[in-house]
Image: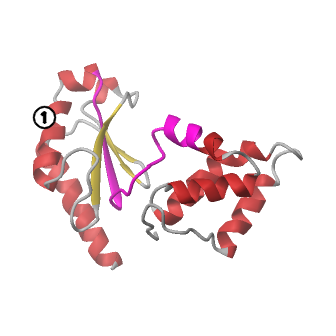
Amino acid sequence: MLSIQENQPVEFSAALLEQFGEIVSRYPEGRQKAALLPILHLVQAEYGWLSTASMDKVAAYLHIQPIEVYEVATFYTMYFLRPQGKYMLEVCRTGPCCLVGAEKIMQHIENRLGVKEGEVTTDGLFSWRGVECMAACGYGPVLQIGPEYTFYENLTEESVDELIDALRNKAKQQA
C-alpha cells in the first residue's frame, strides 16, 4: 500500500488505470458513474485512503464533477478520508454490544495501542474506531479488522490483545 499526503499530486499507475477500464466496461455507455464505488475501493487499496487529489483524479477519469465523488466518499464509512493504519479495528458500538462490554473493549484498545479513535499508531500499523451495527447482536462484543475484514466475536480484553499481537507478528513477517 502506497501512501500520499493531502494536496500531493496523484498519478494512477497503468495497472490501476487498466483495472478502472475493466470496471467501467461493465456498464452501458454514458453510465460510467456506476463504476465509482469499485474504483474508490481500488484507489483506497492502493494509497490507504482517499485524499482530495485522488478523488479529483477519479472524477476526471469518470468525467463527473468532484463533488459527486466527495458525496459518495463521505457517505460510506468504508472510505477513509485521512490516513489510517495498516490494520483498522472496527468495534460495534450499538446498544446490544455496549450492554456486553463494547465500550470497555474500545477503552482497552485505546489504552493498548496508545491512540484515540481515528488516530494512527506511531508504527503506522493500527487505527481503530467504533462503528454502527455489525449484525451480530448475539455474539457481542464484536469487531472486524480491515483491510481483510476478518470478524471476531465474544471479545475479551485478552482476546483483543491476542489479535493485536498476531497482527504485529504478521506485519513483522511481511516486512
Image height of 159 relative to 100, above or below: below
Question: Is 85 left, or right, of 38 in this rendering?
Answer: left
Whole-percent x, y for residue 108 in the image: 12, 44
Element marked by disc 1:
helix
Report which residue position mark 1 lands on: 104
Q: State how the image is colored.
A: secondary structure
Q: Specify start and end residues of the magenta stretch as a single range.
A: 70-94
Depicted 94 relative to depicted 42: above or below = above
Q: Is residue 49 left or right of residue 28?
A: left
Looking at the image, which is closer to me, 85 or 12?
A: 12
Q: Residue at x 35, y 76 (%)?
A: 174
Furthest residue to the right? 29
Q: Position of residue 143 (x, y in %)?
A: 31, 41
Up-down: is 145 above or below 12? above
In reply to whether residue 16 is colored magenta, the answer given is no
Q: Horizontal placement of 165 versus 59: left or right?
A: left
Location of residue 126 in the rendering, given as x and y in whole percent from the top left corner: 27, 58
Which residue corresponds to the image point at 44% horizontal and 49% vertical from the top-left? 81
**Residue displayed at 18% across by 52% down:** 115
Q: Specify whether residue 90 is painted magenta.
A: yes
Residue occupying image coordinates x 13% and y 40%: 107
Name the kind of residue labelled 1 in the image.
Lys
Q: Residue furthest front?
A: 7
- Depth check, front residue: 60 or 96: 60
Residue 175 pos. (x, y %): 33, 80
